[in-house]
Amino acid sequence: MPLHRPESLSAALELLQGGRAVALAGGTDLYPALRDGTPPPEMVDLTRVDGLRGISRSETGWRIGGATTWTQVLKADLPPLFNGLKAAAREVGSVQIQNTGTVAGNLCNASPAADGVPALLALDAEVELAAPSGTRRMPLGDFITGPRATHLAPGEILTALLIPEADGRGAFFKLGARRYLVISIAMVSAVVETEGDAIKSARLAVGACSPVARRLPALEAALAGKTISQAGQAALTYDYPELSPIDDVRAGAGYRREAVATLVARAIGQAALTDKEVPHVA
Amino acid sequence: MTKTFRMDEAQPRLLDETGQGIVGAPLDRPEGPKKVSGRAAYAADGLPENAAHGVLVRATIAQGRVTKIDESSVSDVSGLLGVFHGPKMTRNPAQGMAGEAPVQPGDEVHYHGQPIALVVAESFEAARDAAQRLAVSYDADTDVITDPSRSETHEQDDPETAGDFEAAFAASEVTLDRTYTTPPHAAAAMEPHAAVAEWEGDAVTLRGALQMLRFNKKELADSLGIDPDKVRILSPYIGGGFGSKLGIGPEAVAAALAARELGRPVRVVMTRQTVFDSVLRRTETSQRLRLGADKDGTLRALSHDDRVSNIRDEGFAEPVSQASQFLYGAEGLSFTQTLARICRTPAGSVRAPGEAVGMLALEQAMDELAEELGMCPVELRLKNLPDKNPMTDQPFSATRLADCLREGAEQFGWGERKPMGERREGDWYVGMGMASAARSNMLIKSAARVRLTGDGAVVETDMTDIGTGSYAILGQITAEMLGLPIAQVEVRLGDTSFPGASGSGGSFGASSAGSATFLAAKAIRETLAERMGCSLSELTLQNGIARGGNREVPLSQLVDGELVEEASVESGSTADSHFSAGFGAHFAEVAVHAYTGEVRVRRMLGVMAMGRILNEKTARSQALGGMIWGIGSALTEKLTHDPRTGHLATRDLANYHVPAHADVPGDLKVVFLEERDDMANPIQTKGIGELGISGAGAAILNAVRNACGARVYDMPATPDRVITAMDAAGF
Ligand SMILES: Cc1cc2nc3c(=O)[nH]c(=O)nc-3n(C[C@H](O)[C@H](O)[C@H](O)COP(=O)(O)OP(=O)(O)OC[C@H]3O[C@@H](n4cnc5c(N)ncnc54)[C@H](O)[C@@H]3O)c2cc1C
């Protein structure tokens, strides 16, 4: 089984044509998923491809390269807008997983429980997809189509995530059956922009409670102009029609619904805090 | 022939009189540096030249028969050496101390995941590929019972009783009748089960991951149909066992069968999923506790009935009510066990079989009773401590349970405990809980050899060190007895060519192998006294110098060549005249999130009296590990079976939730109370490996109740269950 380690995007793309080779980033989804099964005939390691690693800023926004690891996200100097993404980065597996696992891998693997997805949905991220014929862009919300399903065409590479510049602050909460290193029962991300005591805009996303993580447009619209505590209240009484949680080994659907409301309220509150206000944790 | 010492009467506390001062000291484990630098060779390491690789093929039906294994389906795999199956393949690991072959089911399948064949190839990859693709045909049974509550074959024991439970229960002023359930658990040792088998003529050497070599040798011989003298097992380092490596496993038998056939060494390493599927699990339990008491808290009636499960033809049934039978006592006692036969991964011993799950129920029931009585849970326990085993009338050999309870309450700040639901910090309810700890203690036949070579000594026994500290403590006992610096003692373990020990199980390894080592060293002391021309009581050995009869002689002068003694110990009449058990008290403080039901353990304290402590550091480590298991059993650990096939759905460490570091509080404390158990064995020790878990989970669950009113009857108390229970309690 050859493992290719190209250094340019064009070489990587060329290697991926023909349908035999599979893209490999950190391998933290790909390898465990093989279990005892047969490995793919060829793999193309993307982590050495020039320009695919790291985070940069342009006039319009931020670019997270398609081979950027979670640790790189954590260590990057980013504005409070990214607090949710950073909190998610800290909760993806363990430090070892964060050192090797990538943001793009998390999205392409498209698990309903992928912790990166809600945080990036709340940031209105777009994916940039490269093929030998050229590059296309699409909102993350469109890119992931179902559990383990995306619009990634055969031979395509996710070269970057593009995040529009915005004010506001992010937050992320993950709920699991143990404190750490756990597959989420539910997770919530919020990006909130405030004006005085009132919410100017809120972007909210929920994961592990539907086949694909979902934004909550109706609740977001309802929050504009509300105070933080009114917003928390609204989150607790909202009925979350976007979600369709199921019973599984991790928790029941009913619990997920109930817990999500709390997590959304908590995330809104957390996102609205300034750096000086440290929240209470047990 | 080595003479066997029988424990028929209390023995002098020699280890308190010797002068080296090393027994009990918190010494590092001597093999530690090897382990953390990757130089300790575990079973799968150090592959012999020319070794072939085997991968187990496992059944994909719940019950039935294998009708065909089509070897031609993998004939294209390059490097394939053979597909092995047949009447000698074993269904599952032997139960602890079986000493004979496990069930050899031939072409029958008794559970999903049962090993049915071994594919061997030149490389691991080729073997794995072929194992994956091997075509197997089955004749599958329909209507297979995988759920113990639906099982039609219930084997019910007669109740074990003392007094008249029903009458005492009826006469009690306050009664409680509760049912608790616990899910199946996995040992989840870090090192996967592995074996390397190599034949020389008609004798086989097996490098295995095994806990009890004296028994394993017979089990392997019986499985293969050869004489035990033709089997040598090496297990010098073991990456955790917790009961899962007590008996010879399918990987070892299959490796030996294939290696014999192929005439070359064969290695078999289980994948993590195979370990979960094919190694003995802990049974799920359903436990009914009935307690009756007078208003002043005196227990009058106690009944603990349980239902456990196992696969057909396995003799083991988790002794769920073990501690309930001796911990408190009452006028009327009754214990009935029911064993349901089902098609699931077979059940066996997992750390503290019995107490680990039984005390989760008993000690929660005691907490509920205290609440009904309006009594402090510590007081309720103090009020009901017997001085004899209430079922057998044997006096306890040594118990400091009352001291553990009092000392624990004091050190933990139990007096600060608030009424239920009254302590809140932000979104978190905070509460405290406690539980007693108890675990019965045993002495198992064990032998050891000690060689004194002047300025150094060597200990040899087939005892194992499963991460517990055997290397450390056996060295310490020898150094203490022979007056040597610890660096001068070498301990050799895990080789059946050495004298046979108890092995590691039931927390009896240190006491049993330690006593044998002690007795061998004691015999050497006798020779040394003779050579010194002094009486034994006059002899002092310290830092390599013998003193006595007004003489001072370096051991190196006293011993030219070697002094070798072998000793063997077994339990005797003190095991009948007295009842020995370790006791302790667990205290926990938890925070429960008011809206998500997440539980965070904030601090825990275990106060334990477990006989003489041989090494304060390794003993503490055992106690801490046990308490962390307590966290797992209370809050996170649960094997889930697919109801259709009985196949495990949570068969890796991502889905079987042992506590992560972040679940374990930094403030996790163990206090040992000084104790000597004169009736237990000649070194006055008790078992320590399992007491830490016994009761620990109940302390956490009782703290959850105190925090937020939630009493979860189906363990573990995952956030969803806590929220539901909080709702039920009106919080
Ligand atoms: C122990 C453990 C714990 C974990 N815990 C968590 C957790 O808590 N939360 C969580 O969300 N995830 C968790 N994961 C899953 C995993 O670590 C993450 O999803 C990670 O972000 C995957 O990234 P990767 O680089 O390792 O992906 P890989 O495994 O390399 O790839 C995943 C998939 O994406 C494809 N791919 C990767 N990069 C690209 C690209 N640039 N273009 C096109 N296709 C690409 C691959 O072909 C593959 O199909 C855990 C995994 C492990 C092993």
Image: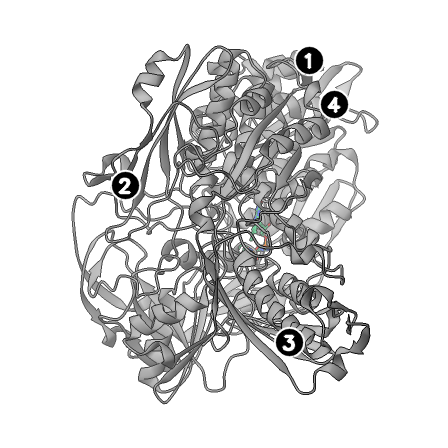
On the rendered structure, is B65 left or right of B491?
A: left
Quarter where residue B273 is shown? bottom left
Q: Identity of the amino acid at label 3?
A: Thr
Q: x, y percentage for residue A100?
A: 65, 57
The residue identified by callout 1 is A229
User: In the rendered structure, which disc, 1 or 4, sits on the residue that comes first in sequence?
Assistant: 1
Q: Nearer the viewer, mark 1 or mark 3?
A: 3
* Mark 2 within 8 Å of ligand 1, using the beta carbon: no
Q: Position of residue B634 (x, y in %)?
A: 51, 34
Measure how far apart labels 1 and 3 are at the Cα level: 83 Å
Please check whether the numbered discs 4 and 2 fall on a single chain: no
Q: Which residue is mark 2?
A: B339
Say which element carries label 3: helix
Q: Is residue B613 left or right of residue B116?
A: right
The chain letter under disc 4 is A
Look at the numbered disc 1 and give the secondary structure of its residue.
Answer: helix
Mark closer to the observer (4, 2)? 2
Of B258 and B291, which appears nearest the observer? B291
Residue A272: mark in rendering: 4
Vertical placement of residue A39 versus A164, above or below: below
Q: Are marks 1 and 3 on the same chain?
A: no
Nearer mark to the viewer, of 1 and 2? 2
Which residue has dot 3 on it? B527
Q: Is residue B446 visible?
A: yes
The answer to whether residue B479 is left or right of residue A234 is right
Mark 2: amino acid: Leu
For the residues marked 1 and 2, what is the alpha-carbon distance in whole angstroms?
A: 55 Å
| Disc 3 chain ID | B
Q: Is mark 1 within 8 Å of ligand 1?
A: no
From the image, state whether disc 2 or disc 3 is nearer to you: 3
